[in-house]
Amino acid sequence: MEAWFRYSDELGLGPYYRDRASTQGAYRAPGASSDAQPVIAGPASQPVPLAMAASAGTRRGPLLPAPRETTAPKPSAAKPLPQVSSAASLFDERIEGDTLDLIREAIGANCTRCKLHKGRTKLVYGVGNPKAELVFVGEGPGRDEDMQGEPFVGRAGKLLTQMIEAMGLRREDVYICNVVKCRPPENRLPEKDEIATCSPFLMRQLAAISPKVICALGSCASQTLLQTTEGISRFRGEWFDFRGSKFIATYHPAYLLRNPGAKGEVWKDLQKVMAVLGLKPKRK
Ligand code: SF4
């Protein structure tokens, strides 16, 4: 509770939240109600506008735009959807009976599948509620995470925890993981081959948890999950369907530490997530 006020104060959103209380219901994310529109699937690797998909009767794919909210503010102009690569997903099919423990076992404590193992202190698998309704996905461990073996425990992690608490949740209520499980040297971005090698385990984690909402933090996680090379600013804050979960991308907490002015945008994204999950921030 205290954390939320601290975070919302940091964001300068005290007035925003008070205003929101009087407009609740008007700010509802797509699919927030129990009578959400059914999602219509597009081709396996390409997002298709819903109207087009409906008329074409297309089959289910890994990614498609979720139905647009009818009461939330509309974008000023129709934006093109992210371009999705034509590469087939390695994990289009769920593994029957898969669990987080089995996936951890499959990775192994001493994984050497990609070159990131060379500089690793601890493999950072993921942490949180295995039945979480909300999963946050970051790009990879940093120095603190590498030392402790837990994702998002450094400065950016503390900010993420504040964000989670601002949403009226505890850190242990959600699940937190990364695209790659080992720290890239000097905190560089994970490279394509590393992502290609490690991300199938992320896909299995997401499938095993099957959360209501997946929130990708930053470009790497967003682009990996959406299979796009578009910049995050093109689709941040928009809803997609990701294999049955709602998917939204927002800025990485590390970016917010460098650009505190973007916190307001992130808070708007988190408000959308809260609307879908029926969450209300804790009050004093
Ligand atoms: Fe294995 Fe993933 Fe670590 Fe690469 S990043 S060594 S694939 S656990």
Image: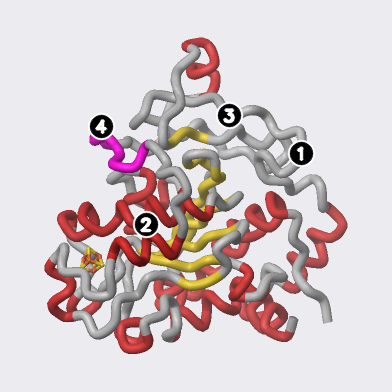
Disc 3: which residue: 39
Q: CA distance from mark 1 to mark 3?
A: 13 Å
**Which of label 4 and label 2 is nearer to you?**
2
The amino acid type found where label 4 is placed reads Ser
Disc 4: which residue: 86
Q: Are marks 4 and 2 in contact (CB under 8 Å)?
A: no
* Circle 4 crowding by C-alpha within 10 Å: few under 14, some 14–19, many from 20: few
Disc 2: which residue: 202
Is residue 86 on the magenta stretch?
yes
Q: CA distance from mark 2 to mark 3?
A: 23 Å
In-image side of 230 versus 24 (left or right): left
* Residue 252 image point, x, y percent: 43, 67
Q: Of helix, strand and loop, which one carries label 4?
A: loop
Q: CA distance from mark 4 to mark 2?
A: 20 Å
The amino acid type found where label 3 is placed reads Val
Q: For the view shown, which residue lies furthest in the top direction? A: 55
